[in-house]
Image: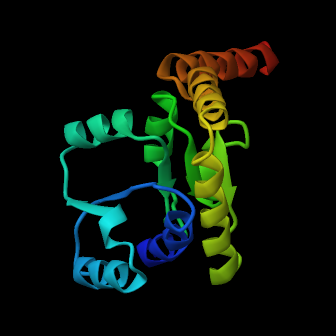
Amino acid sequence: MKAVDFVLEAFAAVVAQTDAVLEIIGDGDLRGELEAQTACLGIDSSVVFSGWLSQQQCAIKLQQADALVLRSLREGGGAVVLKAMAVALPVIATNWGGSGDYLNSRGGILVKPASKEGFVNGLTDGMLKLAQPPELPQSMGSAGGERVREHFDWERKVDRIVEIYQQSIDTCPKP
């Protein structure tokens, strides 16, 4: 479940306290309903629906953004979290699957999908935290970038695989 409607609900509380703008990337059958929800919530002047974008356009958007909100309730992969962290972007994501494995509290905010109300409130709190003066978003972005380089960089992965193979070889009985 993609839960964009929950993000809009959470963002309505953010707009009441900040001048933040939410950009939604992607398209689909629910776009009309989501645009109607945005109007109903009175936040249509603060939400931009960009539609489908190429990978290159998405990469540019990530570099221009202040934060990434990955709103999927169950995200098995969450590679976009790593992409955001790699460009030092703080992330708000569901504490489920890949996102929960990649992100820690130093690099972003994980929201538990325990209940709709709790999830929406967690998203609101996360967005409000990152809308504050730049120290927190900047430190989270830096920490996320560092975590990607230390744990998820391809060279580091190859080094770790070589370490595992070497340990296996070392522990095998000699003929």
Residue 85 image point, x, y percent: 52, 34
x 57%, y 18%: residue: 156
Q: Is residue 74 left or right of residue 33?
A: right
Q: Is residue 20 left or right of residue 135?
A: left
The foreground one among 92 and 153 is 92
Note whether 116 is above or below 132 in the view shown: below
The foreground one among 52 and 148 is 52
Residue 95 image point, x, y percent: 66, 59
Q: Quadrant of the C terminus?
A: top right
x 43%, y 36%: residue: 83
Residue 70 image point, x, y percent: 49, 57
Q: Quadrant of residue 94?
A: bottom right
Number of dots carrying numbers? 0
x 44%, y 78%: residue: 5
Q: Quadrant of residue 49?
A: bottom left
Q: Is residue 102 visible?
A: yes
Note whether 107 is above or below 43 in the view shown: above
Note whether 13 is above or below 127 in the view shown: below
Q: Is residue 138 left or right of residue 5?
A: right
x 50%, y 36%: residue: 89
State how the image is colored.
rainbow
Q: Is residue 77 visible?
A: no
Residue 102 image point, x, y percent: 61, 42
